[in-house]
Amino acid sequence: MARKPSGPLRRGWTTGACATAAARAAYAALVTGAFPDPVSITLPKGETPAFPLARESQGEGWAEAGIVKDAGDDPDVTHGALILVRVAPGPAGSGVRFRAGEGVGTVTRPGLPIPPGEPAINPVPRRLMTETIAADSAMLGGPVDVEITVSVPGGAALAQKTWNPRLGILGGLSILGTTGVVVPFSCSAWIHSIHRGVDVARANGFDHVAGCTGSTSEAGVRRLYALPEEAFLDMGDFAGGLLKYLRRHPVPRLTLGGGFGKISKLAAGHLDLHSGRSQVDLDRLAETARSVGAGDALAARIAGANTANEVLGLAAEARLPLAAEIARQARAVAQETVAGQVAVEVLVFDRQGALVARADG
């Protein structure tokens, strides 16, 4: 693990944010002949960062812009990588279409948020680029039907340092990001912020707090409960950091929200849910499926699945209460970790944010 820099940690930008900015610059050059430099974009939470261009080129019917990714103080494998985006007009009525250039992977297996055969450009970056092109088309009078090719020179080698090959993403990296912002990875800093969040909740007399693994599960919890902003603790992957602190500094009620994969790790006893430090145990999921009625064939398919999301889909097709059992097991682990000092509820959400299981005792 990289050493944490001294002093405050500097945030960075996701590959998705860099690709969106490069797409905006390339589109402007395609329409006007000039590249905006720096180029600014609006991120999902309203931030408007500006990115300097590292490369500009254009030819007949295309323009290309490149941005060097700055991950801040996060030890990100793509820090310093060139995110290169080419924009060209597409067939009439095609809308915005995406292509994988050099160093960007292609999805080859089910269970990921992008279907097989598609470039590994995740939904939020796709939405950001699509919305940006639509806005700039209206402003500049350019085409609404465009083809966007995203490349990361050297990305195929970088991808070998990630889980992409195991997930069936072949040929390169994924273009990622849900907020556009890279929060520097630091266990101690993150856990410290969790502790301070509990302190604030207790100081305000809250009797119900929530810890979520990500933005999708947090949005799901918000739909269920009208909790104040300060009651949402930035748990992320550090379930243990939250649960152990609550054992010593209890709040009456805790809602834990997460996706099926993360919650299945907690059910297996893992308190650190980061993909680099714990893995989804497919064999365990298969045995758990057997315990709630799965036959040999379904259990074998679960054991051989590509992702936890695929397992969830298989269980749903079979109307098997696997997610409910995983939620129950995860709640038992959490309840044991807080030593009975807190009443824990566990909520499991799918990738679309729908609640698929609940365990509240």
Image: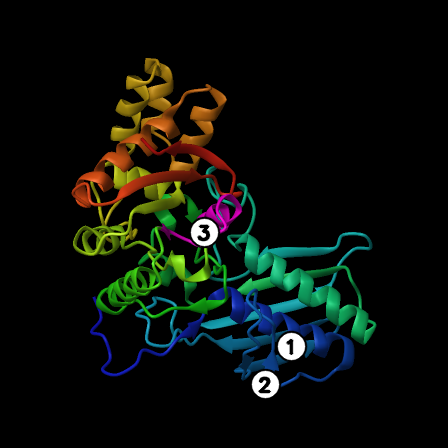
Q: Secondary structure at mark 2?
A: loop
Q: For the residue marked with disc 1, what is the amino acid?
A: Ala
Query: Which numbered disc, 3 or 1, marks the residue that appears first in the sequence?
Result: 1
Q: Secondary structure at mark 1?
A: helix
Numbered disc in front, either 3 or 1: 3
**Mark 1 Cα shell of 10 Å, populated few (<14), some (14-19), many (≥20):** many
Residue bearing the label numbered 3: 218
* Magenta-span inclusion, residue 215: yes
Q: For the residue marked with disc 2, what is the amino acid?
A: Pro
Q: Secondary structure at mark 3?
A: helix
From what the image shows, is residue 322 above or below residue 56?
above
From what the image shows, is residue 11 above or below residue 344?
below
Q: Are marks 2 and 3 in contact (CB under 8 Å)?
A: no
From what the image shows, is residue 115 above or below residue 272?
above
Quarter of the image that includes the C terminus = top left
Q: Is residue 159 left or right of residue 119?
A: left
Part of the protein shown in magenta: 208-226
